[in-house]
Image: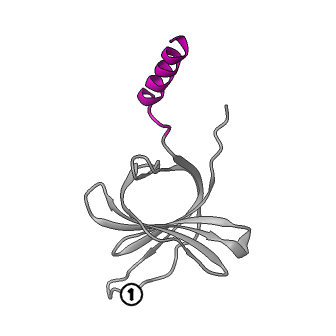
């Protein structure tokens, strides 16, 4: 009887305690912008600018959060199929922004560049590029 009670309490606690969400944190070290001109053609990438901001991918809440001067958040509508080439691993996401507009986000790992990671945020008229690294919290 005692073993049954202990087992029951253990199962009850296990059912009550929520599972830990899978959250990936990155630190952005630089960013660049690509914009369409008045003719609708893509221009040139801006020079890379140094930055230091946190980017969070929360797969439990299906959301990207970018802690820039103005916080950006993107709700993930669909996790697209990962693509791999000889040079890149592309993890695309179909998202919507806080205003409900469609946005595509992609994390690209550059295999021939020491597995450097970049986050692309593609909108209709511009693309934001962040160079990112895994963020390790100091305890």
Magenta-drawn stretch contains 125: no
**Which of 61/50 is in front?**
61
Question: Is 8 placed left or right of 109 in the picture?
Answer: left
Rendered location of residue 87, percent (x, y): 66, 79
What residue is drawn where x is 30% and y is 67%? 102
Location of the C terminus by quadrant is top right
Magenta-drawn stretch contains 18: yes
User: Is residue 91 placed above or below 3 in the rendered structure?
Assistant: below
Q: Which residues are magenta?
A: 1-20
Question: Is 38 placed left or right of 23 in the picture?
Answer: left
Q: How many marks?
A: 1
Question: Is 108 placed left or right of 126 in the picture?
Answer: right
What residue is drawn where x is 62% and y is 80%? 85
The answer to which image quadrant residue 12 occupies is top left
Rendered location of residue 58, percent (x, y): 46, 48
Under circle 1, the secondary element is loop
User: Is residue 42 placed above or below 96 in the rendered structure?
Assistant: below
What residue is drawn where x is 58% and y is 65%? 118
Q: Which residue is mark 1?
A: 41
Colour convention:
one colour
**Which of 41/86 is in front?**
86
Q: Residue furthest top?
A: 2
What residue is drawn where x is 52% and y is 16%? 6
């Amino acid at each position: 009887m005692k073993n049954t009670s202990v087992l029951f309490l253990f199962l009850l606690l296990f059912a009550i305690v929520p599972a830990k969400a899978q959250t990936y944190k990155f630190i952005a070290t630089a960013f660049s912008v690509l914009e369409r001109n008045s003719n609708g053609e893509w221009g040139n990438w801006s020079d890379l600018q140094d930055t230091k901001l946190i980017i969070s991918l929360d797969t439990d809440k299906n959301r990207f959060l970018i802690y820039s001067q103005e916080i950006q958040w993107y709700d993930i509508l669909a996790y697209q199929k990962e693509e791999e080439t000889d040079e890149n691993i592309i993890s695309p996401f179909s998202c919507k922004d806080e205003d409900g507009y469609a946005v595509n986000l992609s994390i690209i790992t550059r295999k021939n560049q020491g597995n450097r990671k970049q986050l692309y945020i593609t909108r209709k008229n511009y693309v934001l590029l962040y160079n990112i690294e895994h963020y390790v919290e100091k305890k």
